[in-house]
Amino acid sequence: MKDTFSTYHPAVNFLYFALVLVFSMWFMHPAALCISLAGAFVWSVYLGGHKAMRFTLLTMLPMMLLAAVINPAFNHKGGTILTYLPTGNPLTLESIVYGAAAAAMLIAVILWFSCYNKVMTSDKFVYLFGRIIPALSLVLSMVLRFVPKFQAQLRVVSGAQRCIGRDVSNGSLLQRARHGIRILSIMVTWALENAIETADSMKSRGYGLPGRTAFSIYRFDERDRSALCWICGVGGFILAMWGAGGLYHRYFPTFKIAAWDAWSVSALLAYLLLCATPLIIDLWEDRKWKHLRYGG
Protein backbone atom coordinates (compact mmCIF):
# COMPACT_ATOMS: atom_id res chain seq x y z
CA MET A 1 0.00 0.00 0.00
CA LYS A 2 1.08 3.57 -0.65
CA ASP A 3 2.02 5.47 2.49
CA THR A 4 0.70 9.03 2.21
CA PHE A 5 2.31 10.23 5.43
CA SER A 6 5.79 9.62 4.00
CA THR A 7 5.02 12.12 1.21
CA TYR A 8 4.76 14.94 3.75
CA HIS A 9 7.64 17.33 4.32
CA PRO A 10 10.62 15.76 6.16
CA ALA A 11 10.22 18.27 9.00
CA VAL A 12 6.69 16.99 9.62
CA ASN A 13 7.83 13.35 9.55
CA PHE A 14 10.79 13.97 11.85
CA LEU A 15 8.81 16.01 14.38
CA TYR A 16 6.14 13.32 14.54
CA PHE A 17 8.60 10.51 15.20
CA ALA A 18 10.50 12.64 17.71
CA LEU A 19 7.29 13.17 19.68
CA VAL A 20 6.00 9.59 19.64
CA LEU A 21 9.42 8.16 20.50
CA VAL A 22 9.98 10.56 23.39
CA PHE A 23 6.43 10.06 24.66
CA SER A 24 6.73 6.27 24.37
CA MET A 25 9.84 6.30 26.56
CA TRP A 26 8.58 9.00 28.93
CA PHE A 27 4.96 8.03 29.63
CA MET A 28 5.02 4.75 31.54
CA HIS A 29 1.31 4.98 32.30
CA PRO A 30 -0.12 1.52 31.43
CA ALA A 31 -2.87 2.91 29.18
CA ALA A 32 -0.40 5.19 27.39
CA LEU A 33 1.93 2.24 26.81
CA CYS A 34 -0.93 0.18 25.37
CA ILE A 35 -1.87 3.04 23.04
CA SER A 36 1.71 3.52 21.86
CA LEU A 37 2.26 -0.21 21.37
CA ALA A 38 -1.03 -0.66 19.48
CA GLY A 39 -0.41 2.40 17.29
CA ALA A 40 3.11 1.31 16.39
CA PHE A 41 2.03 -2.28 15.71
CA VAL A 42 -0.92 -1.37 13.47
CA TRP A 43 1.06 1.16 11.45
CA SER A 44 4.05 -1.15 11.07
CA VAL A 45 1.73 -3.86 9.74
CA TYR A 46 0.14 -1.32 7.38
CA LEU A 47 3.59 -0.36 6.07
CA GLY A 48 5.19 -3.80 6.05
CA GLY A 49 2.23 -6.14 5.55
CA HIS A 50 2.40 -9.79 6.57
CA LYS A 51 6.18 -9.63 6.89
CA ALA A 52 5.93 -7.00 9.64
CA MET A 53 3.20 -8.94 11.41
CA ARG A 54 5.25 -12.14 11.32
CA PHE A 55 8.31 -10.27 12.62
CA THR A 56 6.31 -8.81 15.50
CA LEU A 57 4.60 -12.05 16.51
CA LEU A 58 7.65 -14.30 16.13
CA THR A 59 10.36 -11.94 17.39
CA MET A 60 8.94 -8.99 19.29
CA LEU A 61 6.26 -10.85 21.27
CA PRO A 62 8.66 -13.51 22.68
CA MET A 63 11.14 -10.73 23.50
CA MET A 64 8.42 -8.85 25.33
CA LEU A 65 7.38 -11.92 27.32
CA LEU A 66 11.01 -12.72 28.15
CA ALA A 67 11.65 -9.19 29.42
CA ALA A 68 8.47 -9.28 31.49
CA VAL A 69 9.46 -12.60 33.08
CA ILE A 70 13.10 -11.75 33.75
CA ASN A 71 12.45 -8.45 35.56
CA PRO A 72 10.70 -9.95 38.65
CA ALA A 73 13.62 -12.35 39.07
CA PHE A 74 16.03 -9.44 39.64
CA ASN A 75 13.73 -6.66 40.83
CA HIS A 76 12.27 -7.36 44.25
CA LYS A 77 10.85 -3.93 45.06
CA GLY A 78 7.21 -3.47 45.92
CA GLY A 79 4.94 -3.80 48.88
CA THR A 80 2.58 -6.49 47.57
CA ILE A 81 4.38 -9.80 48.09
CA LEU A 82 2.81 -12.69 46.19
CA THR A 83 5.24 -15.44 47.11
CA TYR A 84 8.91 -16.15 47.68
CA LEU A 85 11.31 -17.42 45.05
CA PRO A 86 13.57 -20.46 45.72
CA THR A 87 16.40 -18.00 46.36
CA GLY A 88 14.42 -16.50 49.23
CA ASN A 89 13.76 -13.20 47.47
CA PRO A 90 10.16 -11.95 47.35
CA LEU A 91 8.10 -11.95 44.16
CA THR A 92 6.05 -8.76 44.20
CA LEU A 93 3.07 -7.66 42.15
CA GLU A 94 4.73 -4.30 41.48
CA SER A 95 7.82 -5.91 39.96
CA ILE A 96 5.65 -8.01 37.61
CA VAL A 97 3.61 -4.98 36.51
CA TYR A 98 6.74 -2.88 36.03
CA GLY A 99 8.39 -5.67 34.02
CA ALA A 100 5.39 -5.86 31.70
CA ALA A 101 5.36 -2.07 31.33
CA ALA A 102 9.09 -1.92 30.56
CA ALA A 103 8.73 -4.72 28.01
CA ALA A 104 5.80 -2.94 26.33
CA MET A 105 7.81 0.28 26.19
CA LEU A 106 10.79 -1.52 24.63
CA ILE A 107 8.72 -3.20 21.91
CA ALA A 108 6.78 0.01 21.18
CA VAL A 109 10.03 1.94 20.66
CA ILE A 110 11.44 -0.78 18.39
CA LEU A 111 8.25 -0.80 16.29
CA TRP A 112 8.22 2.99 16.03
CA PHE A 113 11.84 2.88 14.86
CA SER A 114 10.90 0.29 12.23
CA CYS A 115 8.26 2.72 10.94
CA TYR A 116 10.82 5.53 11.12
CA ASN A 117 13.22 3.62 8.87
CA LYS A 118 10.48 3.20 6.25
CA VAL A 119 9.35 6.83 6.29
CA MET A 120 12.45 8.90 7.15
CA THR A 121 14.80 7.95 4.33
CA SER A 122 18.45 8.99 4.34
CA ASP A 123 17.89 11.80 1.84
CA LYS A 124 15.23 13.31 4.13
CA PHE A 125 17.61 13.23 7.08
CA VAL A 126 20.44 14.82 5.08
CA TYR A 127 18.00 17.46 3.81
CA LEU A 128 17.03 18.42 7.36
CA PHE A 129 20.45 18.36 9.01
CA GLY A 130 22.94 18.58 6.14
CA ARG A 131 23.58 22.28 6.66
CA ILE A 132 23.47 22.22 10.46
CA ILE A 133 25.61 19.14 11.16
CA PRO A 134 26.90 18.02 7.75
CA ALA A 135 29.45 15.46 8.96
CA LEU A 136 27.17 13.85 11.55
CA SER A 137 24.16 13.82 9.22
CA LEU A 138 26.24 12.06 6.55
CA VAL A 139 27.46 9.45 9.04
CA LEU A 140 23.95 8.83 10.37
CA SER A 141 22.60 8.59 6.83
CA MET A 142 25.26 6.00 5.96
CA VAL A 143 24.47 4.06 9.13
CA LEU A 144 20.74 3.99 8.41
CA ARG A 145 21.39 2.77 4.88
CA PHE A 146 24.04 0.27 5.90
CA VAL A 147 21.85 -2.60 7.12
CA PRO A 148 19.59 -2.98 4.04
CA LYS A 149 22.54 -2.47 1.67
CA PHE A 150 24.64 -4.97 3.63
CA GLN A 151 21.86 -7.56 3.46
CA ALA A 152 21.43 -7.08 -0.29
CA GLN A 153 25.18 -7.35 -0.92
CA LEU A 154 25.42 -10.40 1.34
CA ARG A 155 22.83 -12.18 -0.81
CA VAL A 156 24.84 -11.33 -3.94
CA VAL A 157 28.14 -12.57 -2.44
CA SER A 158 26.55 -15.73 -1.01
CA GLY A 159 24.96 -16.52 -4.38
CA ALA A 160 28.29 -16.07 -6.16
CA GLN A 161 30.12 -18.25 -3.64
CA ARG A 162 27.40 -20.91 -3.88
CA CYS A 163 27.93 -21.15 -7.63
CA ILE A 164 31.55 -22.15 -7.13
CA GLY A 165 30.82 -24.46 -4.19
CA ARG A 166 32.12 -22.15 -1.45
CA ASP A 167 28.93 -21.25 0.37
CA VAL A 168 28.26 -21.97 4.07
CA SER A 169 25.98 -24.81 2.94
CA ASN A 170 28.78 -26.64 1.07
CA GLY A 171 31.31 -29.11 2.46
CA SER A 172 32.10 -30.38 5.92
CA LEU A 173 31.68 -28.42 9.12
CA LEU A 174 35.26 -27.10 8.95
CA GLN A 175 34.88 -26.18 5.28
CA ARG A 176 31.61 -24.39 6.00
CA ALA A 177 33.32 -22.38 8.72
CA ARG A 178 36.10 -21.41 6.29
CA HIS A 179 33.56 -20.43 3.66
CA GLY A 180 31.69 -18.33 6.22
CA ILE A 181 34.89 -16.56 7.27
CA ARG A 182 35.73 -15.89 3.63
CA ILE A 183 32.27 -14.40 2.99
CA LEU A 184 32.58 -12.30 6.14
CA SER A 185 35.98 -11.03 4.99
CA ILE A 186 34.54 -10.09 1.60
CA MET A 187 31.66 -8.23 3.24
CA VAL A 188 33.89 -6.31 5.66
CA THR A 189 36.14 -5.28 2.77
CA TRP A 190 33.12 -4.21 0.73
CA ALA A 191 31.67 -2.18 3.62
CA LEU A 192 34.94 -0.33 4.25
CA GLU A 193 35.48 0.41 0.54
CA ASN A 194 31.89 1.57 0.17
CA ALA A 195 32.25 3.96 3.12
CA ILE A 196 35.50 5.39 1.74
CA GLU A 197 34.03 5.83 -1.74
CA THR A 198 30.97 7.59 -0.33
CA ALA A 199 33.09 9.92 1.79
CA ASP A 200 35.39 10.75 -1.14
CA SER A 201 32.42 11.31 -3.43
CA MET A 202 30.72 13.70 -1.01
CA LYS A 203 33.98 15.53 -0.37
CA SER A 204 34.64 15.98 -4.10
CA ARG A 205 31.17 17.53 -4.44
CA GLY A 206 31.90 20.06 -1.74
CA TYR A 207 29.56 18.56 0.81
CA GLY A 208 29.60 20.57 4.03
CA LEU A 209 31.41 23.60 2.61
CA PRO A 210 30.02 27.03 3.57
CA GLY A 211 27.60 28.45 1.02
CA ARG A 212 27.09 25.17 -0.79
CA THR A 213 23.57 24.77 -2.16
CA ALA A 214 21.76 21.49 -2.71
CA PHE A 215 18.93 20.33 -4.93
CA SER A 216 15.78 19.38 -3.06
CA ILE A 217 12.41 18.03 -4.14
CA TYR A 218 10.76 18.95 -0.83
CA ARG A 219 8.44 21.95 -0.60
CA PHE A 220 6.60 23.03 2.52
CA ASP A 221 3.01 23.56 1.36
CA GLU A 222 -0.36 24.15 3.02
CA ARG A 223 -0.87 20.44 3.69
CA ASP A 224 2.42 20.26 5.58
CA ARG A 225 1.58 23.41 7.51
CA SER A 226 -1.73 21.94 8.64
CA ALA A 227 -0.10 18.66 9.67
CA LEU A 228 2.64 20.49 11.57
CA CYS A 229 0.08 22.62 13.44
CA TRP A 230 -1.91 19.49 14.31
CA ILE A 231 1.11 17.59 15.61
CA CYS A 232 2.37 20.56 17.63
CA GLY A 233 -1.12 21.27 18.99
CA VAL A 234 -1.82 17.70 20.07
CA GLY A 235 1.69 17.28 21.45
CA GLY A 236 1.38 20.50 23.44
CA PHE A 237 -2.02 19.45 24.78
CA ILE A 238 -0.64 16.09 25.90
CA LEU A 239 2.22 17.82 27.73
CA ALA A 240 -0.24 20.19 29.38
CA MET A 241 -2.42 17.31 30.56
CA TRP A 242 0.68 15.49 31.79
CA GLY A 243 1.67 18.59 33.73
CA ALA A 244 -1.81 18.65 35.27
CA GLY A 245 -1.31 15.08 36.52
CA GLY A 246 -3.45 13.33 33.94
CA LEU A 247 -0.77 10.72 33.21
CA TYR A 248 0.51 10.25 36.73
CA HIS A 249 1.83 6.75 37.48
CA ARG A 250 3.78 5.02 40.21
CA TYR A 251 5.04 1.46 40.31
CA PHE A 252 6.94 1.46 43.61
CA PRO A 253 6.48 0.96 46.49
CA THR A 254 2.86 0.31 45.47
CA PHE A 255 1.22 0.52 42.07
CA LYS A 256 -0.88 3.63 41.53
CA ILE A 257 -2.10 5.63 38.52
CA ALA A 258 -4.02 8.87 38.12
CA ALA A 259 -7.78 8.80 38.67
CA TRP A 260 -9.94 8.48 35.56
CA ASP A 261 -10.97 12.12 35.49
CA ALA A 262 -11.22 14.67 32.67
CA TRP A 263 -7.46 15.32 32.69
CA SER A 264 -6.53 11.65 32.38
CA VAL A 265 -9.15 10.70 29.77
CA SER A 266 -8.48 13.76 27.59
CA ALA A 267 -4.72 13.14 27.72
CA LEU A 268 -5.12 9.51 26.67
CA LEU A 269 -7.57 10.41 23.88
CA ALA A 270 -5.16 13.05 22.57
CA TYR A 271 -2.31 10.52 22.74
CA LEU A 272 -4.43 8.01 20.84
CA LEU A 273 -5.09 10.57 18.11
CA LEU A 274 -1.39 11.42 17.91
CA CYS A 275 -0.30 7.78 17.59
CA ALA A 276 -3.03 7.11 15.01
CA THR A 277 -2.38 10.25 12.93
CA PRO A 278 -0.32 8.58 10.14
CA LEU A 279 -2.74 5.67 9.88
CA ILE A 280 -5.73 8.02 9.74
CA ILE A 281 -4.06 10.00 6.95
CA ASP A 282 -3.22 6.84 5.00
CA LEU A 283 -6.69 5.33 5.36
CA TRP A 284 -8.36 8.62 4.43
CA GLU A 285 -6.25 8.92 1.28
CA ASP A 286 -6.95 5.28 0.41
CA ARG A 287 -10.67 5.95 0.74
CA LYS A 288 -10.43 9.04 -1.46
CA TRP A 289 -8.46 7.11 -4.08
CA LYS A 290 -10.99 4.27 -4.15
CA HIS A 291 -13.84 6.78 -4.42
CA LEU A 292 -12.16 8.49 -7.38
CA ARG A 293 -11.28 5.20 -9.04
CA TYR A 294 -14.56 3.36 -8.66
CA GLY A 295 -16.88 6.35 -8.44
CA GLY A 296 -18.46 5.49 -5.10
Image: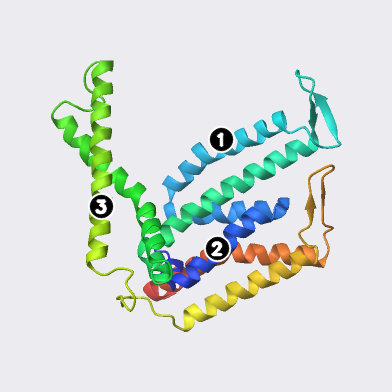
Label annotation for residue 62: 1
Image quadrant in which the N terminus is located: bottom left
Residue 106 is situated, as x and y percent measured from the top left of the image, at 59, 46
Instruction: Classify mark 2: helix, strand or loop.
Output: helix
Instruction: Classify mark 1: helix, strand or loop.
Output: helix
Q: CA distance from mark 3 to mark 2?
A: 31 Å
Q: Which residue is mark 2?
A: 18
Return the disc, 2 or 1, that comes first in the chain's sequence: 2
Above-or-below relation of 153 to 21: above
Label annotation for residue 196: 3
Image quadrant in which the C terminus is located: bottom left
Instruction: Say whether residue 33 is left or right of residue 109.
Output: right
- Asked whether disc 1 touches disc 3, contact meaning CB atoms under 8 Å apart, the reply is no
Please indicate, yes or no, whether residue 1 appears anywhere in the rendered image: no
Q: Amino acid at mark 1?
A: Pro
Residue appearing at x 60%, y 33% in the figure: 66
Return the disc, 3 or 2, that comes first in the chain's sequence: 2
Q: Residue furthest left?
A: 164
Instruction: Say whether residue 146 is left or right of residue 226.
Output: left
Neighbour class for label 3 at 10 Å: few (<14), some, many (≥20)?
Answer: few
Callout in the foreground (3, 2): 3
Residue 118 is situated, as x and y percent measured from the top left of the image, at 42, 57
Residue 185 is situated, as x and y percent measured from the top left of the image, at 25, 34
Instruction: Classify mark 3: helix, strand or loop.
Output: helix
Q: CA distance from mark 2 to mark 1?
A: 27 Å
Looking at the picture, tell me which residue is in the foreground, 279 or 156: 156
